[in-house]
Amino acid sequence: MSDACCCAGPKMPSTTSTITRAARWDHFLARWGVRRYSHRVEPGLYALGNPSPDSHVFVTANYTLSFDALRSSLGGIDGYIMVLDTRGINVWCAAGKGTFGTDELVRRAEATALRDVVSHRTLILPQLGATGVSAHEVRKRSGFRVEYGPVRARDLSDYLKTHAATAEMRRVRFGLTDRLTLAPIELVGVMLPTLVAAVMLLAAFGPVACGAAVAAVLAGTVLFPALLPWIPTPNFSTKGLVLGAAVALPFAVAGGVTAASAAVAQPAWWRVGQGLVYLLSMPPVTAYLALNFTGATTFTSKTGVRKEIYKYIPVMAWMLGSGIALGIALAILKG
C-alpha cells in the first residue's frame, strides 16, 4: 500500500487513490467481522500523489475502510493524509469514543512534524469526526486550524473547489444500502449461539421452535435494518418488539396447527399457550439485537439510547423469561 516518499520529508510513506483487489478483500473481511480489530493502517502522515508544502492535509482514522474511502475519493489530487490512531475504529464511532479526538489530533501533528512539512496551518477533517474534536483547543495547542469537510468523502473534490459545503454535503444519510452493509457483521456476531440454540430447540421441541429461533435472530440482524425507517414506533426497542411480534405470528399459528394435527391432539387452551410462547419469546430476542444498531445509525443519541436501555431491557427480560417458563410448563403438562 505504501512506498517511501522523499518529496515531503525523509522516508514518508506514500499511498495512491487506487483500491487494489487485496484492499477490496480486506473490506469484505471487515464487513463480515473476520479478524474484526485487525483492519488497521499504521498511524502517521502519508503522501498522496506528489504533494508540495502547499498541499492540503486530510485527517482520517486508521480503520482501513475509512482510510481507503478517503484516498479513493482523492484521485488526481496531491496532498497529505494524516492517519490518527483510533485503534482500528471508523471516524464516527472513534469520535464518540474519544480516540478520534483533540488529544490524538494534536499528538499526531507533533509526532509527524507536520509544521515542518506544510507551509499552511489547516487540517481538513471529516464532518462526522466533529463530536470528538475541539477546534479551538487544537488551534491553541498545535497552531493548526480545523476545517470540517463534507459528510461523504466522495464529495471532497467538489468541496475543495470552494471550501464551502453545500447543504447536501452536510446532510447525513442512512439509506438502505448503508443499513444493510452493517447486517453481516451483526449476523456473524450471533451466528454461533444461534446455531447452538437452534439445534437444542430442534431436539427438544421440533422444527417449528428451531425455525422460530433462527427467524427471531434474522429479523433482528437483517430484516430490522432493512425496515428500520418504516416501522412506526419512536425508538429501536419498540420497533424491534413490533417486528419480532410480526415475525412470531406465523410461528404461533404454526405451533397451534401442529399441536392440533398431532396424533394426540392437544386441547384448545394448550394450543393458545403454545402460540403465546412464540409471541412472548421471539419479540424480545429481535428487539435486543435491534438495539445493537443504535450506535451505528443517525437516528439516535447517547442519552436517548441510555434511557431506552433502562426502560425496555427489563421488559425484554420479563417477556423472554415468561415465554421460556410457559414453554417449559406446557412441555411438562403435555408429558
Image (spheres, grey):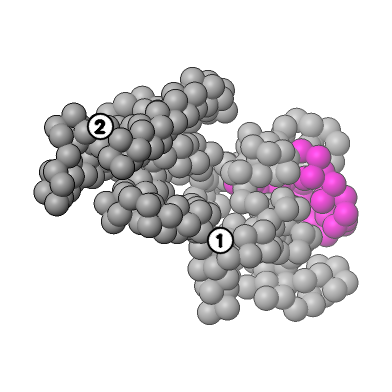
Dot 1: few (<14), some (14–19), or many (≥20) neighbours within 10 Å? some
- Say if 143 sits above or below 89 in the image: above
- Say if 93 sits above or below 208 in the image: above
Q: From where the camera sits, is residue 183 visible? A: no
**Dot 1 lies on which element?**
loop
Residue 267 left/right relative to 159: left
Dot 2: few (<14), some (14–19), or many (≥20) neighbours within 10 Å? some
**Residue furthest toward the front?**
335
- Residue depicted at x 78% and y 75%: 5
Q: Which mark is residue 33?
A: 1
- Say if 326 sits above or below 91 in the image: above
- Along the line of sight, the residue nearer the viewer: 241 or 235: 241
The amino acid on which the numbered mark 2 sits, given as a three-letter code, is Gly
User: In this picture, which residue range is highlighted in magenta?
Assistant: 102-127
**Quarter of the image that includes the C terminus:** top left
Residue 43, percent from left and from top: 77, 59
**Dot 2 lies on which element?**
helix
Disc 2 designates what residue? 273
**Quarter of the image that includes the N terminus:** bottom right
- Say if 188 sits above or below 176 in the image: below
- Distance from disc 2 to disc 1, alpha carbons, whole Å, reads 39 Å
Q: Is residue 111 magenta?
A: yes
**Residue furthest toward the left?**
261
